[in-house]
Amino acid sequence: MYAVKKDKHHNNKAGSTPAGMVQRKMGSNQTRIITAKKVKVIFMYYFLICFYVLDYCFFSNRELMMKNDDLGLLLGTMDPDMLTDGTPVDPAVLDDWNSIFKSVPSSDHELIDLIDSFLEYYEKNEGFDFPFARKILKQNEVLNYVKTAKEKALETCKKYDY
């Protein structure tokens, strides 16, 4: 888990972290310090993986999705290439992702579960309906696609310098 520790005086006391830095507990006595920018990159990286995995789901059966599923609508709000700065068309989608994304997934299966939780969040809170997207998301082909989604997400992070 990440926690921002505010210290506007940049004190160097034990356990003190300069403002804008983040501490991450690594183990019983280990703490790794990373910048807030790096936290943003990690956050955006996983948001983009989510986008590319869902995009793959949509295009794996586009005709069915367009008739009976709200995934295309959600993807339109998430797409990093719609605006010139790489931010989603609807910035609120990042807040929604933030409510789901609490820690870095430890496996691709856990990542798929996280993405499914994101869709579930939209069903429960925004009235979306993803009857086919959530089924497709659980197929092995999608799990196999995660590596490609990670590569695309990394490219996009570099492109927009998050």
Image (cartoon, grey):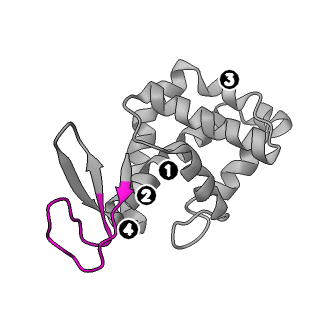
**Residue closer to the observer: 18 or 141:** 18
Magenta stretch: dominant secondary structure: loop
Mark earlier in primary sequence (1, 4)? 1
- Mark 3 vs 2, N-terminal side: 3
Q: Against 58, is 126 above or below?
A: below
Boundaries of the magenta span: 3-22
Q: What residue type is labelled 2?
A: Thr
> Which residue is painted at 24% across and 71% down in the image?
18
* Residue 92 screen position, x and y as percent: 65, 61
| Distance from Cα at disc 2 to Cα at disc 4 | 8 Å
Tell me which corner region of the image, top left, top right, bottom left or bottom right, holds residue 94.
Answer: bottom right
Using the image, tell me which numbered label, if any, was put on residue 135.
3
Q: Nearer the viewer, mark 1 or mark 2?
A: 1
Give the residue at mark 1: 48
Where residue 28 sits: x, y (%)? 20, 37
SS for callout 2: helix
Q: Mark 1 or 2 closer to N-term? A: 1
Quarter holding the C terminus? bottom left
Q: Is residue 39 left or right of residue 98?
A: left
